[in-house]
Image: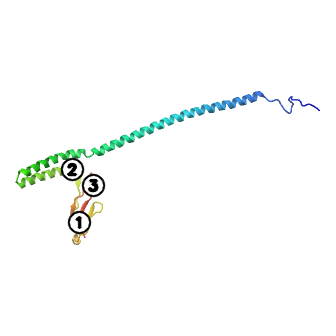
Amino acid sequence: MMEENNLPTEESPMPDIREDNKQESAEMADQNTDDIEIIKLSAELAEQKDKYLRLFADFDNFKRRTAKERIELIQTAGKETIISLLEVIDDCDRAEKQMKTSDDMKISLEGNLLVFNKLRTILQQKGLTAMESMHNDFDVEKHEAITEVDMGEALKGKVVDELEKGYYLNDKIIRFAKVVVGK
């Protein structure tokens, strides 16, 4: 029997160790670049998370601040109007004092009319206007019909009486007029 020899033959060439080393080096280099890329991506992710958290905190602070400002605005929204109405209250107090000490009804009536006119003027300066409803067509967008009264054909569908005036504040209806409508 012939012994097999372990020497390379033409059919089985000797393995090239340099080829294997190159391949291992290439794999290690690929793994190192992957590790470096992972580290870079991790750092970028951490930076983005930090930016997100800061942005979220800024937005949360903004929401709290605007809510607080809104509450303060609502609480003091009528301050200017109230201050201007204090003059009317002072006039009412003086008129009440005058009515208690004077028996002249004509002077008391004139004083009260002055106070009422001053009140109306102040409210008009603030944008309040009265709605004109009498003898106009009934409009469901402006009027609230309390009742209907038979007034003949000429006043059918018209406002014949106004129980409460309607008002606009800067051209927006703030109170509907309560009216009696002819039928």
Q: Which kind of residue does numbered mark 1 sit on?
A: Val
Structural distance between the alpha carbons of marks 1 and 3: 20 Å
Q: Which quarter of the picture shows residue 6?
A: top right
Could you tell whether 5 is left or right of 154 in the image? right
Q: Which kind of residue does numbered mark 3 sit on?
A: Ile
Q: Which mark is residue 12?
A: none
Q: Residue 57 at x, y = what percent?
A: 43, 38
Asked whether residue 134 is in view, the answer is: no
Residue drawn at 39 percent across, 42 percent down: 63
Mark 3: few/some/many CA within 10 Å (<14, 14-19, 20+): few
Q: Secondary structure at mark 3?
A: strand
Q: Looking at the image, which residue sits at the far right?
A: 1
**Residue that label 1 marks:** 180
Name the quadrant of the C terminus. Answer: bottom left
**Residue that label 3 marks:** 174
- CB atoms of marks 2 and 1 within 8 Å: no
**Residue that label 2 marks:** 123
Of the numbered discs 2 and 1, the one sitting upstream in the chain is: 2
Residue drawn at 30 percent across, 44 percent down: 73
Mark 1: few/some/many CA within 10 Å (<14, 14-19, 20+): many
Against 33, residue 107 (above or below) is: below
